[in-house]
Image: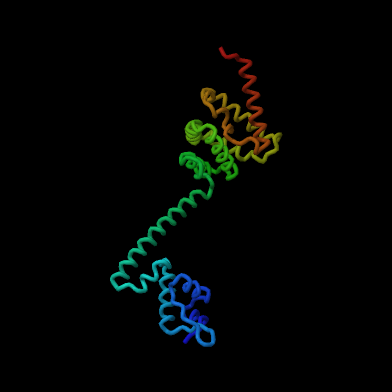
Amino acid sequence: MLTISQLAATAGVTVRTVRHYHRIGLLAEPDRDASGYRRYNAQAAVDLIRIRTLADAGVPLARIDALLHAQPTEFAAAITDIDADLQRKIDRLAEHRRRIAELAGGERLVLPPEVVAILDRMRGIGVSERTVRLERDARILIQALDPRATSQWIQDKNAGFADPDRTRLYLACDQAVDWDPHDPRVDQLIDDLDAWELEHEGDLSRPGSRTVVSSLVTEASPAWQRILDVLAHRALRRSIAVPDT
């Protein structure tokens, strides 16, 4: 005869587990002997080992009792059913893992696939992750405020990827994020951007294409802020010098 501790050790479980099986009616609890101890026979050890084996295999505790008393054909059918249920759970977990992996960057959570594709393309051409995140956050805000603007942004961005000069200027703006606003390189970049705008003046009528850096979050960089301020000032002077007829 075995004590509860010896029974648990024989089956490779804890005493707490044995007592839990008693509470849910999965394992019969023997009466106490004259000394006040519960004593378990060999059959109890066999039953407990079978319970542990089924539980370790993923069989729900609620189904184990029926399996312990099932005929071979019933047992096989029940195991097949349990296996199918486990496979469905595996498939659901695999889908959850796929979605979590997609959400790791925080982009697919609220942005359309076309926007995410552009963000990935920006990474591919060498745009820093900081600028990509700024673009992402700007698109999240704009998507919430004006979803219709997203399609135009997608069109403009894809057109920009096809323009080597525009891509070069965008990468230069990305590098300028940490520059001092009065760094001579900022002045040169302003001139280059201004020249690009003059050359592509026909594109300026489209919302969101004021400059190559218009989609960047200017608050993130004093240099970017100065770039946009100077470009806006130059454009205003030109519009005053040449009134709209």
Estimate the x, y position of residue 170 in percent, counting from the top left: 57, 36
In-image side of 62 versus 192 (left or right): left
Q: Residue furthest front?
A: 34
Q: Residue furthest left?
A: 73
Q: Is residue 98 above or below residue 144?
A: below
Image quadrant in which you'd find residue 28 = bottom left
Quarter of the C terminus within the rendering: top right
In-image side of 241 versus 109 (left or right): right
Estimate the x, y position of residue 65 in percent, counting from the top left: 39, 71
Estimate the x, y position of residue 235 in percent, counting from the top left: 62, 22
Q: Is residue 82 above or below residue 52?
A: above
Q: Residue at x 58, y 44 (%)?
A: 128
Nearest the eye: 119 or 196: 119
Q: Residue furthest top?
A: 245
Asked whether the viewer can see residue 80, the reply is yes
Q: Residue at x 50, y 86 (%)?
A: 33
Q: Residue at x 60, y 14 (%)?
A: 243
